[in-house]
């Protein structure tokens, strides 16, 4: 099918309605009502929607009910929000959907964590290896994919209970909006499940070797040079570390002569996947500059393992760092 013939039009009415749902969920997440408050509000809203009273009566009833909820801070924020949001009967129905989707968002988030544990990295891999790094990416990626698939199941025809709970509104697409909300709200959980960043993994490596270090400091002799880690050796010597998962053009940073700096050696730590011989030669052209790379990249790359100033991160320890100063 030709792309030009695809029908990719969205009516303004549908866009505005789904945006209203999205904003409603975002606002409610910011207010942070408790699980009990959400359930109580849903019960009251469902009762009101089934009554034949006017919208004004329904609205006043909900506001009065909200005033009686426990938790003054959240209650006051809910009252202020409802007062602005509840402009007509459709807004009340959207609120019903929003409160339900908040519940299902948290349920899907917790459920997705069960599946994510299948992608935890093998303890046999070194934490600075390229393969470890690649496997770590499966954790956040798998959470996003799992969440999307679970939401698809949640809204499938087999889940009849969901159709009974969520009020149907023409042009409203709660499944799509929940997908968007889940992708955003899972960010914090993704961070904790994915484990440490590349820099944090390197810090764990230093700590496991009982190597003393400072984080993120500037050289006192040349303030434009920043060290991700400044390692202090037992002989009072210091090594500056630049820790970059990948380099792009950043390999040209901190490329100053050691004589100008308040350190005794400079080390670049990187995966090594975007290094080439020209980059390596450029980085190591100055005295007391060294490179440490992932062991699995180091072992299979001749211009790395044959260069005496390039080392495997698996071999990093204080004894080896001492030799960088003394040789």
Image: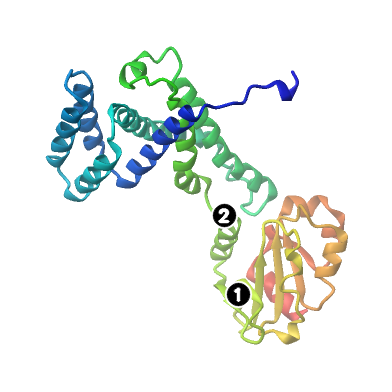
Callout in the foreground (1, 2): 2
**Mark 1 vs 2, N-terminal side:** 2
270 vs 133: above or below: below
Quarter-wise, where is residue 206 in the image? bottom right
How was the colour assigned to the protein in this rendering?
Answer: rainbow
Q: Is residue 33 visible?
A: no
Residue labelled with disc 2? 197
For the residue pair 286 and 234, the one nearer the viewer reads as 286
Q: Is residue 54 visible?
A: yes
Quarter-wise, where is residue 160 in the image? top left
Instruction: Say which mark, if any, is on residue 206.
Output: none
Rendering coords of residue 70 (x, y %): 14, 43
47 vs 138: above or below: above
Distance (Cα) linking label 1 and label 2: 18 Å
Residue at left offset 75%, top offset 65%: 251
Rendering coords of residue 71 (x, y %): 17, 46
Residue at left offset 21%, top offset 43%: 79
Residue labelled with disc 1? 230
Label 1: which secondary element: strand
Label 2: which secondary element: loop
């Amino acid at each position: 099918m030709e792309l030009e013939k695809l029908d990719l039009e969205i009516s303004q009415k549908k866009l505005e309605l789904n945006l209203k749902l999205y904003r409603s969920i975002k606002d409610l997440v910011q207010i942070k009502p408790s699980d009990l408050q959400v359930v109580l509000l849903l019960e009251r809203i469902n009762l009101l929607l089934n009554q034949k009273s006017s919208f004004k009566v329904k609205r006043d009833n909900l506001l009065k009910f909200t005033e009686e909820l426990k938790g003054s801070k959240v209650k006051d924020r809910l009252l202020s929000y409802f007062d602005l949001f509840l402009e007509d009967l459709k807004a009340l129905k959207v609120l019903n959907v929003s409160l339900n989707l908040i519940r299902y968002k948290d349920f899907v988030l917790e459920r997705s964590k069960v599946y994510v544990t299948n992608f935890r990295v093998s303890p046999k891999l070194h934490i600075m290896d390229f393969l470890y790094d690649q496997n770590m990416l499966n954790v956040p990626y798998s959470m996003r994919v799992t969440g999307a698939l679970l939401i698809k199941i949640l809204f499938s025809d087999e889940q009849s209970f969901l159709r009974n709970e969520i009020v149907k509104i023409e042009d409203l697409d709660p499944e799509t909006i929940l997908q968007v909300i889940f992708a955003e709200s899972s960010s914090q959980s993704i961070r904790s499940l994915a484990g440490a960043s590349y820099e944090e993994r390197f810090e764990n490596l230093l700590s496991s070797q009982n190597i003393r270090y400072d984080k993120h400091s500037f050289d006192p002799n040349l303030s434009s040079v920043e060290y991700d880690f400044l390692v202090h050796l037992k002989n009072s010597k210091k090594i500056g570390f630049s820790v970059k998962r990948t380099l792009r053009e950043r390999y040209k940073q901190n490329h100053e002569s050691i004589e100008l700096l308040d350190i005794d050696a400079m080390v670049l730590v990187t995966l090594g996947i975007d290094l080439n011989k020209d980059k390596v030669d450029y980085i190591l052209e100055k005295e007391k500059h060294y490179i440490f790379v992932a062991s699995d990249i180091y072992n299979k790359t001749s211009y790395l393992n044959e260069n005496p100033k390039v080392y495997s991160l698996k071999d990093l320890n204080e004894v080896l760092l001492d030799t960088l100063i003394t040789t």
